[in-house]
Image (spheres, rainbow, N blue to C red):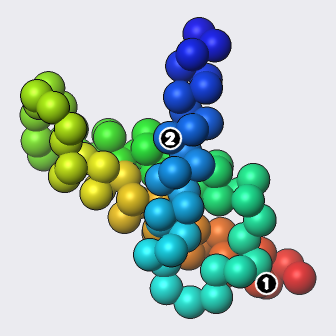
Amino acid sequence: MLSALLWALIGGTIIGLLGKMLAPGDRDNVPLWLTVLCGIGGVLLGNFLYGLFFDLNTRGFDWWRHGWQVVVAAILVSLAAGRTARTR
């Protein structure tokens, strides 16, 4: 349980930061904690969407699945940036 939480935080941070770099527009308004949450959401939603179209049981490092995760995280970061810009 603790290792799953730790991997979710590490993976969410990496995917969130990659998504933040890929996201268009003004992303500087998004704090780190929200970037990590967008990364965790990107991992979960990206896995789900990838699983709808492709087989999740692949051998080795699945670059395509992680690409989907980063793109979903970029969309979430863009949405968060637009939301935080309106509230400030």
Vertical order, 39 against 47 (above or below): below
Q: Residue furthest bottom?
A: 25
In the image, which disc is placed on residue 86?
1
Kind of residue indicated by mark 2 = Gly
Q: How many marks?
A: 2
Secondary structure at badge 1 equals helix
Identify the residue at image location x=44%, y=75%. 22
> Would residue 28 appear left or right of 13 to someone viewing this image?
right
Q: Quadrant of the N terminus?
A: top right
Residue in the foreground of this view, choosing between 75 and 19: 19
Q: Which kind of residue does numbered mark 1 sit on?
A: Arg
Please report the residue visible at 49 percent of the width from the left and 85 percent of the height from the top. Answer: 24
Which residue is rendered at x = 64% and y = 88% of the image?
26
Q: Is residue 47 above or below residue 27?
A: above
Rate crowding at label 1 as few (under 14), some (14 to 19) or many (20 or more) other CA atoms within 10 Å. Answer: few
Q: Position of residue 7 (x, y in %)?
A: 53, 28
Question: Residue under circle 2?
Answer: 11
2 or 1: tag closer to the N-terminus: 2
